[in-house]
């Protein structure tokens, strides 16, 4: 069993491409992270995405909401409450850095309470912010997620992208000290380039340090960030960890995701 805890696909065409990739790579389930149309990139409305995945029991959706858009927040919050009451989503993704707010911003508290009520995780974008024009990386520091984890011990939390590259150690500490916090390595590998091998080797070392610091693989999830990346690239990367036992790999490949997302 293999679960990809972080993919992007919204239109029918993108979803067909995702399903094809999952079949090819023997991925049993994928969790789609909604993009709340920050900046220029436009994706279909959440209800349309829900409609597009309706016939595929192996696809799940984490919704999203813009925290800093005062004009739209109330409407989006009502929408979120509505789809949650129908149990149509498995998480709420917040885009730290792409929007200018820290994880411990009091404006998020309403979201956290809602996630607790429906027993679904909040997922944070952390670390590098690609080339999005107005993004500010300091907001993505996972150290502020510790405040949330302590204040809301019943809230399940996923730190996406390990806080890579600035804060993998911070992520290790936050997931180690809080029972309710997990992380994944999606979207962290190098694109083809001159120092690709060196970069990926270094990342592997840092992930091993993180797991060793936690003393368990029960805090790490498999994810790819398809279709920014190819899913096979991440499978190959996970297979390169000869340090992990078969049992360790079962947690990383699917058991941790099953526990977190209840899928
Ligand atoms: Zn992503």
Image (cartoon, rainbow, N blue to C red):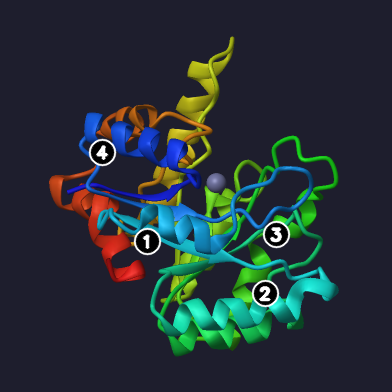
Which of the marked residues, 1 or 4, is nearer the chain's N terminus? 1
Of marks 3 and 1, which one's residue comes earlier in the chain?
Answer: 3
Q: Which residue is drawn at 84% across and 74% down?
A: 71
Separation (CA) of disc 4 from disc 2? 44 Å
**Where residue 76 is drawn, which disc sits there?**
2
Q: Is mark 1 on a helix, strand or loop?
A: loop
Residue labelled 2 has its Cβ within 8 Å of some atom of ligand 1: no
Residue denoted by label 1: 219
Give the structural element (helix, strand or loop) at label 3.
loop
Q: Mark 2 Cα within 10 Å, few/some/many (few <14, many 20+)? A: some
Judging depth in this view, the residue of 49 and 18 nearest the camera is 49
Say the numbered circle drawn on residue 89.
Answer: none
In the rendered structure, the answer to whether residue 2 lies left or right of residue 99 reads: left
Q: Which of marks 4 and 2 is in front?
A: 2
Which of 114 and 46 lies nearest the eye of the viewer?
A: 46
Residue positioned 38% across, 27% down in the render = 233
- In three-dimensional space, the C-alpha distance between marks 3 and 4, rounded to whole angstroms, equals 32 Å
Question: What whole-number distance in Å separates the C-alpha atoms at marks 1 and 2?
Answer: 31 Å
The 10 Å Cα crowd at callout 1, few under 14, some 14 to 19, many 20 or more, is many
| Disc nearer the start of the sequence (4/2) | 2
On the image, the x and y values in percent for residue 179 come to 41, 76
The residue sitting at 23% across, 35% down in the picture is 23
Q: Where is residue 251 in the image (x, y as percent from the top left)?
A: 24, 56
26 to the left or right of 92: left
Residue at the disc numbered 3: 96
Of labels 1 and 2, the one closer to you: 2
Q: Badges 3 and 1: C-beta atoms under 8 Å apart? A: no
Disc 4 is placed on an element classified as loop
Which residue in the rendered view is the most extreme toward the left?
Answer: 246
Camera-nearest label, 3 or 4? 3
């Amino acid at each position: 069993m293999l679960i990809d805890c972080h993919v992007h696909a919204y239109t029918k065409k993108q979803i067909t491409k995702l399903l094809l990739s999952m079949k090819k790579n023997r991925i049993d389930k994928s969790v789609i992270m909604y993009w709340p149309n920050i900046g220029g990139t436009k994706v279909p409305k959440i209800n349309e995405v829900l409609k597009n995945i309706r016939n595929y029991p192996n696809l799940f959706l984490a919704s999203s909401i813009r925290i800093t858009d005062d004009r739209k927040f109330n409407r989006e919050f009502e929408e979120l409450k509505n789809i949650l009451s129908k149990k149509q989503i498995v998480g709420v993704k917040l885009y730290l850095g792409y929007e200018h707010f820290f994880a411990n911003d009091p404006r998020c508290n309403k979201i956290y309470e809602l996630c607790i009520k429906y027993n679904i995780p909040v997922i944070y974008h952390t670390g590098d912010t690609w080339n999005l024009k107005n993004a500010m990386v300091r907001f993505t520091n996972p150290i502020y997620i510790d405040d949330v984890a302590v204040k809301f011990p019943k809230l399940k939390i996923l730190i996406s992208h390990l806080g890579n590259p600035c804060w993998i150690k911070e992520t290790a500490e936050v997931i180690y000290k809080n029972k309710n916090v997990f992380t994944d390595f999606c979207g962290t590998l190098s694109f083809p380039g001159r120092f690709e091998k060196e970069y990926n080797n270094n990342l592997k070392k840092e992930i091993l340090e993180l797991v060793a610091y936690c003393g368990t693989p029960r805090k790490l999830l498999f994810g790819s960030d398809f279709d920014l990346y190819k899913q096979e690239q991440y499978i190959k990367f996970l297979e390169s960890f000869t340090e992990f036992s078969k049992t360790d790999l079962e947690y990383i490949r699917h058991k941790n995701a099953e526990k977190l997302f209840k899928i």
